Amino acid sequence: MVKPNPFIIVESTRFSAFDPFKVKNIVWLKALISCNKFTTAFSNSSSMDSFPRSLNPNKHLREQFVSNLPGSSMLEVSALLNNVALLMLLRHTFCSQTVNDACRSLKSYLASVALDYVFLVLPTLLIFTVLAEWVYICLIGLLLLLVFFTAVKRTYSLPYMEGPNASRASISSYRVVTMFITCLCILAVDFRIYPREYAKTETYGASLMDLGVGSFVLMNAVTSRQARNIKSSMSWWKAAFKSTTPLLLLGFARLASTLSLDYQVHVGEYGVNWNFFFTLAGVSILTSILNVPAEYSGILGSVILVGYQSWLTNGLNVYLLSNERGTDVISRNKEGIFSLFGYWGMYLVGVQVSYYLFFENHTTKQRSKHETRIRICFLTIMFWILTLLIDRYVERISRRMCNLAYVTWVVAQNLQLLALRLLADNIIGHKTLCLERAFDRNLLASFLVANLLTGLVNLSVDTIFVSPLSAVLILVSYSLTLCVVMVLIDFSGVKYKFW
């Protein structure tokens, strides 16, 4: 029996979460028409015995579903991130016990995690899907709720820490928020209930998922040994081997699994064979080879970014955005290989920013949180101004090339999240959520588990044909399973965190 084709007639209005066929951009309309043509041809030929059976029969249709997208706006992406940050702060205001108290028994731990899920993960999932049309209303409502409960509980008078560990809780919360968003989006994007403007852009533009790989690179920079000015006793090649081997193994494992399972791959993201883990490994190798002190790394990063941007504007961008590919490795993976210059520069800038905010003169004095807040607010405003100017007068934001506008935008958005958490420190106190600790202590493991669950769902369900209600139920089950797995790993005492 032939499945119904979801790509029928579309209206040129704003994409609605519960009405996924309405879009607002002609580019997406062309993508749908292209998908429709392919689906018709595929359906007509599906009965032919000459076609081998595949584990992923709708592979090309799924690839088209996430292709040729224009993105949304920087303002909307910022509002989405702030919604999640406010949910985290609200949950902190309701947190009545410490992690150590909750960890005394599995029952109390799971009860605390259940509250974390209901007040943090579930609302985030709904805002990204069924409530996407009301993202600004949700933001205003959450802000008013936070102000109200803060005034009622009078928690603004809580003391806050000073010293070398003062900002660690804020950095951890920022990392966890970023991971929550990533884990939810990597599966939600495969459903029609997820707005297409939040998916990765094809060439130019800004979207929620465009922040993913850039935020990972920046997170690594913020908490790196280089930013903390910790000298390694190993030679550079030993350090590079130790840090990159796991990433390279993961990269080749992902490549092998996608080829063997005939899993959908959007070639425009990284190339034919490249993937996220190879990008992280490449940045790690380049950083190890050219190890610059943290106080000067931003200068080197800026030089690399300006040089790379000049190369792009002088013709490299035409080559990277074209669909033509040769047979050599570089041409087949041109997006992933050349964007390494942008991610490397971003990493180096992130190292100096983190050093400037949290670790400068760490051994001789203890910077107050007040001074840190002033610095991070200044840097946030500065990077936002740079982003707007570069996006308007140099080249628009492009995740695919990791150009200069993309780098400054990622830094601005991430600093904004960090600033919001730092500014709220003396409002919410210092209690760490159980779910927050479970993810923070096993950040990479949580991403791997999320990828495995995403693959299982995609191979088991035709996500683009699923109804809105079924999609919500699947996403809730997925996110709940992910949280339970990470909590059990944490409760068992397993910890993969190196700072």
Image (cartoon, rainbow, N blue to C red):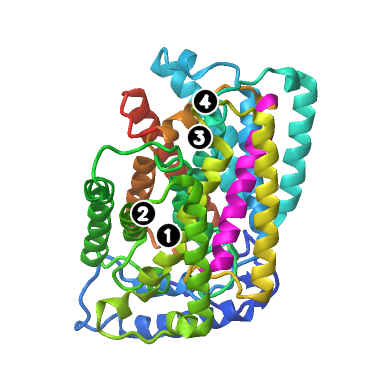
Label 3 Cα crowd, 10 Å radius (few <14 / some 14-19 / many 20+):
many
Label 2: how many Cα within 10 Å (few below 14, some 14–19, many 20+): some
Asked which secondary structure carries label 1, the reply is: helix
| Contact (Cβ within 8 Å) of mark 1 with mark 2 | yes
Residue 481 position, x and y percent, is 40, 39
Q: Pointer 2: what residue?
A: 287
User: Could you say which is closer to the camera, residue 470 or residue 283?
Assistant: 283
Disc 4 marks a residue whose amino acid type is Asn
Q: Which badge, 1 or 2, is on the more N-terminal residue?
A: 2
Question: Height in image: 92 above or below 439?
Answer: above
Boundaries of the magenta span: 403-426
* Label whose residue precedes the other's in the sequence (2 or 3): 3
User: Which of the two discs, 3 and 1, sits closer to the camera?
Assistant: 1
Q: Secondary structure at mark 4?
A: loop
Predominant SS of the magenta segment: helix
Could you tell me residue 273's position as x and y percent?
Answer: 28, 69
Name the residue type under label 2: Thr
Residue 51 image point, x, y percent: 22, 80
* Alpha carbon separation for disc pair 3 and 1: 23 Å
Task: Name the residue rendered at 37%, 69% in the picture.
Answer: 336
Earlier residue among tags 1 and 4:
4
Q: Which residue is mark 4?
A: 165
Mark 2 and mark 3: Cα distance apart in space: 23 Å
Pointer 1 residue: 344
